[in-house]
Amino acid sequence: MNDFLHVAKPDFALGRAVPHAITKFMVATDCSRRHCLFSGRVQGVGFRYRSRNLAISFDVTGFVRNLADGRVELVAEGPAKEVEAFVEAIIDRMKTYIRDCDAAEEPASGEYSQFIISR
């Protein structure tokens, strides 16, 4: 596990949400969702662009966006191993810019059909 990543598991049981649309990973039984808030010098350094390009190599959907307070928010859904590997890849690629990553596991919603840069 990376030194930057702090994952908080929710107090409630992780149930499976009924997807709004069938996405490429919904047939898997281990769908998960990771909600990450990256802090440090993470805006203006290509963080969102690199995250979106990395997502192509993983079976994940979701979004990445800049926040007004200077952090970057990322939500990724997919098979648990894919989501974990994706977040670790982002941290590895952007480690010189990341001071901290607060992450929470959440029930997957299936609301995303691809990984996008959100505004």
Image (spheres, helix red, strand yellow):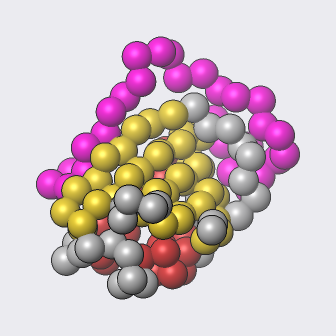
Q: Is residue 85 visible?
A: no
Specify the farthest residue to the bottom: 45
Per the rendered image, the range of residues in magenta is 1-29
* Residue 28 picture quarter: top right
Q: Is residue 19 left or right of residue 93?
A: right
Q: Is residue 77 visible?
A: yes
Residue at 47 percent across and 45 percent down: it is 34
Front-most of residues 39 and 63: 39
Specify the farthest residue to the right: 21
* Residue 95 picture quarter: bottom left
Q: Is residue 57 magenta?
A: no
Residue at 49 percent across and 75 percent down: it is 48
| Tally of marks | 0
Q: Is residue 81 left or right of residue 20?
A: left
When the figure is inspected, residue 8 is found, relative to residue 12, above or below; the finding is: below
Q: Is residue 7 left or right of residue 64?
A: left
Specify the farthest residue to the front: 68
Q: In the image, residue 100 lies at what x, y percent?
A: 22, 56
Q: In the image, residue 9 lies at what x, y percent?
A: 37, 28
| The C terminus sits in image quarter | bottom right
When the figure is inspected, residue 107 is found, relative to residue 88, above or below; the finding is: above
Q: In the image, residue 52 lies at what x, y percent?
A: 55, 74
Q: Is residue 18 magenta?
A: yes
When the figure is inspected, residue 55 is found, relative to residue 29, above or below; the finding is: below
Specify the farthest residue to the left: 3
Q: In the image, residue 39 lies at what x, y percent?
A: 29, 60
Residue at 38 percent across and 75 percent down: it is 43
**Is the stretch drawn in magenta largely helix, strand or loop?**
loop
Residue at 54 percent across and 40 percent down: it is 32
